[in-house]
Image (tube, rainbow, N blue to C red):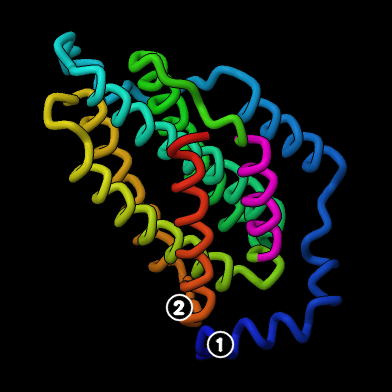
Amino acid sequence: MLSGNNAIQTALREGPRLCSYSMKSLDDWLVAADNALRTVAARSHAGRPNPSAAVPDDAALAETDKALAGALMRVNHVGEVCAQALYQAQALTARSDELRREMDRAAREEGDHLAWTEQRLEELGARPSLLNPLWYAGAFGIGLLAGRLGDRVSLGFVVETERQVEQHLAGHLDRLPGADRRSRAIVEQMKEDERRHGDAAEAAGGIGLPLPVRGAMRLAARLMTRTAHYV
Protein backbone atom coordinates (compact mmCIF):
# COMPACT_ATOMS: atom_id res chain seq x y z
CA MET A 1 0.00 0.00 0.00
CA LEU A 2 1.36 3.40 -0.93
CA SER A 3 1.75 6.05 1.73
CA GLY A 4 0.26 9.49 1.11
CA ASN A 5 3.67 10.94 0.21
CA ASN A 6 4.60 8.09 -2.14
CA ALA A 7 1.21 8.03 -3.82
CA ILE A 8 1.32 11.76 -4.56
CA GLN A 9 4.94 11.63 -5.74
CA THR A 10 4.09 8.75 -8.08
CA ALA A 11 1.08 10.61 -9.44
CA LEU A 12 3.13 13.72 -10.09
CA ARG A 13 5.77 11.71 -11.99
CA GLU A 14 3.00 10.20 -14.10
CA GLY A 15 1.34 13.57 -14.70
CA PRO A 16 1.35 13.55 -18.53
CA ARG A 17 -0.23 10.08 -18.59
CA LEU A 18 -3.00 11.25 -16.31
CA CYS A 19 -4.32 13.62 -18.95
CA SER A 20 -5.86 10.70 -20.83
CA TYR A 21 -7.88 9.78 -17.76
CA SER A 22 -9.12 13.29 -17.03
CA MET A 23 -10.29 14.33 -20.48
CA LYS A 24 -14.08 14.46 -20.61
CA SER A 25 -16.59 15.13 -23.32
CA LEU A 26 -17.66 18.62 -24.26
CA ASP A 27 -21.04 17.87 -22.68
CA ASP A 28 -19.38 17.18 -19.32
CA TRP A 29 -17.54 20.50 -19.43
CA LEU A 30 -20.70 22.35 -20.46
CA VAL A 31 -22.54 20.81 -17.52
CA ALA A 32 -19.69 21.89 -15.23
CA ALA A 33 -19.88 25.45 -16.61
CA ASP A 34 -23.65 25.48 -16.07
CA ASN A 35 -23.21 24.29 -12.49
CA ALA A 36 -20.67 27.05 -11.89
CA LEU A 37 -23.07 29.73 -13.13
CA ARG A 38 -25.92 28.31 -11.08
CA THR A 39 -23.76 28.22 -7.95
CA VAL A 40 -22.48 31.80 -8.10
CA ALA A 41 -25.31 33.60 -9.92
CA ALA A 42 -28.62 31.79 -9.40
CA ARG A 43 -30.86 31.05 -6.45
CA SER A 44 -30.11 27.67 -4.89
CA HIS A 45 -32.78 25.05 -4.19
CA ALA A 46 -32.48 22.31 -1.59
CA GLY A 47 -33.61 18.73 -2.03
CA ARG A 48 -34.08 18.29 1.71
CA PRO A 49 -36.12 20.40 4.16
CA ASN A 50 -34.26 23.25 5.83
CA PRO A 51 -33.30 22.11 9.38
CA SER A 52 -34.33 25.53 10.70
CA ALA A 53 -37.86 25.30 9.30
CA ALA A 54 -39.34 24.02 12.56
CA VAL A 55 -37.34 26.46 14.70
CA PRO A 56 -39.18 29.69 15.62
CA ASP A 57 -37.39 32.84 14.49
CA ASP A 58 -36.12 34.97 17.36
CA ALA A 59 -37.33 38.46 16.53
CA ALA A 60 -35.53 39.79 19.61
CA LEU A 61 -32.08 38.92 18.23
CA ALA A 62 -29.88 41.94 18.97
CA GLU A 63 -28.44 43.81 16.00
CA THR A 64 -24.89 43.01 17.06
CA ASP A 65 -25.77 39.32 17.33
CA LYS A 66 -27.52 39.45 13.97
CA ALA A 67 -24.44 41.01 12.38
CA LEU A 68 -22.16 38.33 13.85
CA ALA A 69 -24.47 35.52 12.75
CA GLY A 70 -24.67 37.02 9.28
CA ALA A 71 -20.88 37.16 8.97
CA LEU A 72 -20.50 33.56 10.15
CA MET A 73 -23.21 32.30 7.82
CA ARG A 74 -21.58 34.20 4.95
CA VAL A 75 -18.37 32.29 5.65
CA ASN A 76 -20.35 29.03 5.69
CA HIS A 77 -22.03 29.96 2.42
CA VAL A 78 -18.60 30.55 0.85
CA GLY A 79 -17.56 27.11 2.10
CA GLU A 80 -20.50 25.59 0.25
CA VAL A 81 -19.66 27.51 -2.93
CA CYS A 82 -16.17 26.01 -2.70
CA ALA A 83 -17.60 22.56 -1.98
CA GLN A 84 -19.64 22.69 -5.18
CA ALA A 85 -16.53 23.61 -7.16
CA LEU A 86 -14.39 20.91 -5.57
CA TYR A 87 -16.89 18.10 -6.07
CA GLN A 88 -17.68 19.14 -9.63
CA ALA A 89 -13.99 19.21 -10.54
CA GLN A 90 -13.26 15.91 -8.82
CA ALA A 91 -16.23 14.26 -10.54
CA LEU A 92 -14.85 15.45 -13.89
CA THR A 93 -11.46 13.88 -13.22
CA ALA A 94 -12.64 10.70 -11.46
CA ARG A 95 -11.40 7.54 -13.18
CA SER A 96 -14.15 5.24 -11.91
CA ASP A 97 -17.88 5.61 -12.42
CA GLU A 98 -18.43 4.66 -8.79
CA LEU A 99 -16.32 7.55 -7.55
CA ARG A 100 -18.01 9.93 -9.98
CA ARG A 101 -21.42 8.93 -8.65
CA GLU A 102 -20.21 9.39 -5.06
CA MET A 103 -18.90 12.88 -5.87
CA ASP A 104 -22.20 13.77 -7.54
CA ARG A 105 -24.17 12.51 -4.53
CA ALA A 106 -22.04 14.50 -2.09
CA ALA A 107 -22.36 17.59 -4.30
CA ARG A 108 -26.16 17.32 -4.10
CA GLU A 109 -26.05 17.26 -0.30
CA GLU A 110 -23.63 20.18 -0.29
CA GLY A 111 -26.13 21.91 -2.59
CA ASP A 112 -28.66 21.64 0.24
CA HIS A 113 -26.17 23.40 2.50
CA LEU A 114 -25.73 26.11 -0.12
CA ALA A 115 -29.48 26.73 -0.27
CA TRP A 116 -29.91 26.66 3.51
CA THR A 117 -27.11 29.14 4.19
CA GLU A 118 -28.36 31.38 1.37
CA GLN A 119 -31.83 31.42 2.91
CA ARG A 120 -30.45 32.18 6.36
CA LEU A 121 -28.37 35.06 5.01
CA GLU A 122 -31.56 36.59 3.60
CA GLU A 123 -33.35 36.17 6.93
CA LEU A 124 -30.49 37.88 8.74
CA GLY A 125 -30.35 40.72 6.22
CA ALA A 126 -26.82 39.76 5.24
CA ARG A 127 -25.33 39.30 1.76
CA PRO A 128 -23.20 36.56 0.23
CA SER A 129 -19.50 37.16 -0.32
CA LEU A 130 -18.72 39.51 -3.19
CA LEU A 131 -15.81 37.23 -4.08
CA ASN A 132 -17.83 34.06 -4.69
CA PRO A 133 -16.76 33.76 -8.37
CA LEU A 134 -13.12 33.93 -7.25
CA TRP A 135 -13.65 31.37 -4.49
CA TYR A 136 -15.36 29.02 -6.95
CA ALA A 137 -12.62 29.33 -9.56
CA GLY A 138 -9.86 28.68 -7.03
CA ALA A 139 -11.60 25.67 -5.50
CA PHE A 140 -12.36 24.24 -8.95
CA GLY A 141 -8.69 24.43 -9.88
CA ILE A 142 -7.68 22.68 -6.66
CA GLY A 143 -10.29 19.99 -7.29
CA LEU A 144 -8.96 19.38 -10.81
CA LEU A 145 -5.44 18.98 -9.46
CA ALA A 146 -6.55 16.58 -6.71
CA GLY A 147 -8.57 14.54 -9.19
CA ARG A 148 -5.72 14.26 -11.68
CA LEU A 149 -3.49 12.79 -8.98
CA GLY A 150 -5.70 9.71 -8.88
CA ASP A 151 -8.86 8.50 -7.18
CA ARG A 152 -7.23 7.57 -3.87
CA VAL A 153 -5.54 10.97 -3.60
CA SER A 154 -8.80 12.65 -4.59
CA LEU A 155 -10.65 10.73 -1.89
CA GLY A 156 -7.92 11.58 0.61
CA PHE A 157 -8.39 15.23 -0.26
CA VAL A 158 -12.12 14.86 0.46
CA VAL A 159 -11.37 13.24 3.82
CA GLU A 160 -9.01 16.04 4.90
CA THR A 161 -11.31 18.77 3.58
CA GLU A 162 -14.32 17.39 5.41
CA ARG A 163 -12.40 16.91 8.66
CA GLN A 164 -11.25 20.53 8.53
CA VAL A 165 -14.75 21.77 7.66
CA GLU A 166 -16.20 19.75 10.54
CA GLN A 167 -13.79 21.45 12.95
CA HIS A 168 -14.59 24.82 11.42
CA LEU A 169 -18.34 24.30 11.90
CA ALA A 170 -17.80 23.19 15.50
CA GLY A 171 -16.03 26.51 16.06
CA HIS A 172 -18.97 28.37 14.57
CA LEU A 173 -21.37 26.58 16.90
CA ASP A 174 -19.31 27.97 19.76
CA ARG A 175 -19.36 31.48 18.29
CA LEU A 176 -22.96 31.79 17.13
CA PRO A 177 -25.17 33.81 19.48
CA GLY A 178 -27.08 31.53 21.82
CA ALA A 179 -30.38 33.12 20.77
CA ASP A 180 -29.81 32.32 17.10
CA ARG A 181 -31.34 28.86 17.14
CA ARG A 182 -32.17 28.85 13.42
CA SER A 183 -28.54 29.29 12.35
CA ARG A 184 -27.45 26.70 14.88
CA ALA A 185 -29.91 24.12 13.51
CA ILE A 186 -28.47 24.58 10.02
CA VAL A 187 -24.84 24.42 11.12
CA GLU A 188 -25.45 21.32 13.25
CA GLN A 189 -26.93 19.44 10.27
CA MET A 190 -24.13 20.62 8.01
CA LYS A 191 -21.56 19.37 10.53
CA GLU A 192 -23.19 15.94 10.62
CA ASP A 193 -23.27 15.73 6.82
CA GLU A 194 -19.60 16.72 6.54
CA ARG A 195 -18.67 14.00 9.02
CA ARG A 196 -20.50 11.41 6.92
CA HIS A 197 -18.85 12.60 3.72
CA GLY A 198 -15.41 12.30 5.30
CA ASP A 199 -16.16 8.84 6.68
CA ALA A 200 -17.46 7.66 3.30
CA ALA A 201 -14.37 8.92 1.46
CA GLU A 202 -12.07 7.28 4.00
CA ALA A 203 -13.95 3.98 3.75
CA ALA A 204 -13.72 4.16 -0.05
CA GLY A 205 -9.91 4.16 0.12
CA GLY A 206 -8.85 7.77 0.59
CA ILE A 207 -5.19 8.04 1.58
CA GLY A 208 -3.77 10.30 4.25
CA LEU A 209 -2.27 13.48 2.82
CA PRO A 210 1.26 14.62 3.71
CA LEU A 211 1.57 17.11 6.58
CA PRO A 212 2.71 20.02 4.33
CA VAL A 213 -0.37 19.54 2.13
CA ARG A 214 -2.68 19.49 5.14
CA GLY A 215 -0.99 22.60 6.49
CA ALA A 216 -1.36 24.43 3.17
CA MET A 217 -5.05 23.53 3.10
CA ARG A 218 -5.53 24.94 6.59
CA LEU A 219 -3.70 28.14 5.66
CA ALA A 220 -5.80 28.61 2.53
CA ALA A 221 -9.01 27.96 4.50
CA ARG A 222 -7.97 30.49 7.15
CA LEU A 223 -7.35 33.14 4.50
CA MET A 224 -10.71 32.44 2.89
CA THR A 225 -12.71 32.52 6.12
CA ARG A 226 -11.12 35.72 7.39
CA THR A 227 -11.74 37.49 4.09
CA ALA A 228 -15.29 36.20 3.64
CA HIS A 229 -16.19 37.31 7.17
CA TYR A 230 -16.15 40.88 5.87
CA VAL A 231 -16.22 40.80 2.04
Task: Characterize the magenta stretch by its predominant secondary structure.
Answer: helix
- Asked if residue 188 lies left or right of residue 6, the reply is left
Residues shaded magenta: 132-145
Q: Which residue is mark 2?
A: 208
Q: Is residue 76 visible?
A: yes
In the image, residue 184 lies at what x, y percent? 21, 32
Badge 2 crowding class, 10 Å Cα cut-off, few under 14, some 14 to 19, many 20 or more, is some
Q: Amino acid at mark 1?
A: Asn
Looking at the image, the residue that sits furthest to the top is 59
- Quick check: marks 1 and 2 in contact, CB under 8 Å? no
Rendered position, 202 above or below 62: below
Q: Residue at x 52, y 22 (%)?
A: 44
SS state under label 2: loop
In the image, residue 113 lies at what x, y percent? 41, 33
Q: Amino acid at mark 2?
A: Gly
* Residue in front for this viewpoint, 213 or 89: 213
- Asked if residue 33 lies left or right of residue 133, the reply is right
Q: Which residue is mark 1?
A: 5
In the image, residue 130 lies at what x, y percent? 59, 30
As measured in the structure, the alpha-carbon distance from the residue carrying label 1 to the one carrying label 2 is 8 Å
Q: Residue at x 70, y 58 (%)?
A: 144
Q: Residue at x 58, y 49 (%)?
A: 87
Q: Which mark identifies residue 228?
A: none
SS state under label 1: helix
* Residue in front for this viewpoint, 18 or 225: 225
Badge 1 crowding class, 10 Å Cα cut-off, few under 14, some 14 to 19, many 20 or more, is some
Q: Is residue 105 visible?
A: no
In the image, residue 211 lies at what x, y percent? 46, 81
